[in-house]
Amino acid sequence: MTVLKDILYKVSLISTTGDMEVEIKNIVFDSRKVEEGSLFVAIPGTQVDGHEYIPKAVENGAKVIVCQQLPEDKSTQVTWVQVKSAAKALGIMASNFYDNPSHQLKVVAVTGTNGKTTTVTLLHQLFTAMGYSTGLLSTVENKIKEEVIPATHTTPDAISVQALLRKMVDEGCTHCFMEASSHAIVQERIAGLKLIGAVFTNISHDHLDYHQTFDEYIKAKKKLFDDLPKDAFALINGDDKRGTVMLQNSKAVGQFFALKSPADFKAKILSNTLEGLELDINGRQVWFRLIGAFNAYNILGVLGTAVLLGEDEDEVMQVLSGIRGAKGRFDRISIGGVTAIVDYAHTPDALENVLKTINGVRTGGEQLITVVGCGGNRDKTKRPIMAKLAVQESDKAILTSDNPRFEEPGAILEDMQAGVGPSDLRKTLTIVDRKEAIKTACMLSQAGDIILIAGKGHEDYQEIKGVKHHFDDAEVVSEFLNQLTKK
């Protein structure tokens, strides 16, 4: 166990009362997980204020309470620590408690609206293939070497992050590649981390239900780069018009990757088909298994990161050319002459990228049938935009459920339908049941056609009224295409 004074190293304190030498068994921010010897952190949240649970934490055996506001009636049986930001203090304390594992690893964080999962997954696969023991923290899964640990959030809570990094160090890992969501950055879930570098993929319309304005969303992403130390690198998508904004106020060494703008890591697309991409990178022609211009950016981000971490550029390109990418990101399934593509695209920008990629590789007579939904209890303003994109860029579009959560699916679909113009109604279907929507897409298809199923990607569940039901887009479309093939 660790004593309190060591856990508080580098935490900005307002006041302390009590024994600073008390031994701490664990750190928690959920009063239900408090046990004898716990340190409880009271975090003000958007839904619940942890300060309300201080009495319960004391009752359950907490020896230390860390909070922003001290209660009037303070128990003399515990040590009180008042801080300016409990969320930030939690990250720093968790790092100290686990002996600062990020100081013993090369940790790279990737942020952006789209491309985070693909970038960190490619980096994990690349460095593993190059002989390194590597960790991964992603939307799809967390990995320590090849051990898979299921992911519940894009970025885990601060305690879980440090615990996973500690395990990575103990298992002999040298690198960790992690997604940093805007929520996690604002909520200080990555406080206490020592980053060797950060990557900015792009930014577009998303998460305005949480951040309220696009400007606040940009500031959330920018904070990652503002907090980088001067010996870290900041690798930026130079073709994104807000890329240079990320480097304002950053002490890190800025580098750029791009397809269109001058950049440190530059590529030109020579060929783009459903089989892969051929790129010219600094005069070298390289073929990759990934598809689409958006993946050309992901490839450049990965290449740049690897080179900035000291790897040989030629070796990186050679190994990277054989890697497939992340599950649920442009997954291609071909059955009975029909190609189904399952993709996580759940923002207007991501959906547009996927649709334009498919349309860019179509050979002529085939249909593109798109199945798309929008999640419940999330940003409503993107719903009509996504429906409009799906209809305009496809021969047929089927609007359906995604994860309705606690919203009525019909209400979500009404929001989506508002984006469909009168002239496009004839090629639009609305089917609430996602399984039926995918089945209908399969029945409408013929040999040579392409079915895009967007929105859920790697997810193997559908969340309805707080309950997760098993649902895997790839499984469902494969089942129906196989049934049609046998007829």
Image: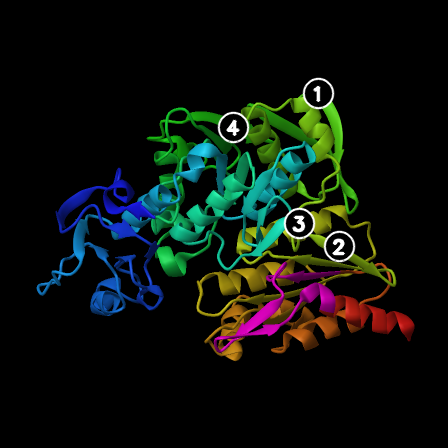
Task: Tell me the crowding category of disc 2: few under 14, some 14 to 19, or many 20 or more residues within 10 angstroms, Cα based.
Answer: some
Quadrant position of the C terminus in the picture:
bottom right
Q: CA distance from mark 1 to mark 2?
A: 30 Å
Q: Say whether residue 26 is left or right of residue 111.
A: left
The numbered dot on residue 256 is 4
Mark 1 and mark 2 lie on one chain; the one further toward the N terminus is: 1
The numbered dot on residue 332 is 2
Q: CA distance from mark 2 to mark 4?
A: 30 Å
Residue at disc 2, secondary structure: strand
User: Does residue 478 show up?
Assistant: yes
The three-letter amino acid code for the residue at tag 2 is Arg
User: Does residue 396 show up?
Assistant: no
Q: Say whether residue 72 is left or right of residue 419.
A: left
Q: Nearer the viewer, mark 3 or mark 4?
A: 4
Q: Are marks 1 and 2 in contact (CB under 8 Å)?
A: no
Residue at disc 1, secondary structure: loop
The residue beneath circle 3 is 356
244 relative to 210, above or below: above
Provide residue 146's location: percent of width, then percent of height. Answer: 64, 47
Task: Tell me the crowding category of disc 3: few under 14, some 14 to 19, or many 20 or more residues within 10 angstroms, Cα based.
Answer: some
Q: CA distance from mark 4 to mark 1?
A: 17 Å
Q: Nearer the viewer, residue 118 or 358?
A: 118
Give the residue at x 46% y 46%: 180
Q: CA distance from mark 3 to mark 1?
A: 26 Å
The three-letter amino acid code for the residue at tag 4 is Phe
Mark 3 and mark 4 lie on one chain; the one further toward the N terminus is: 4
Res. 284 image quadrant: top right
258 relative to 331, above or below: above
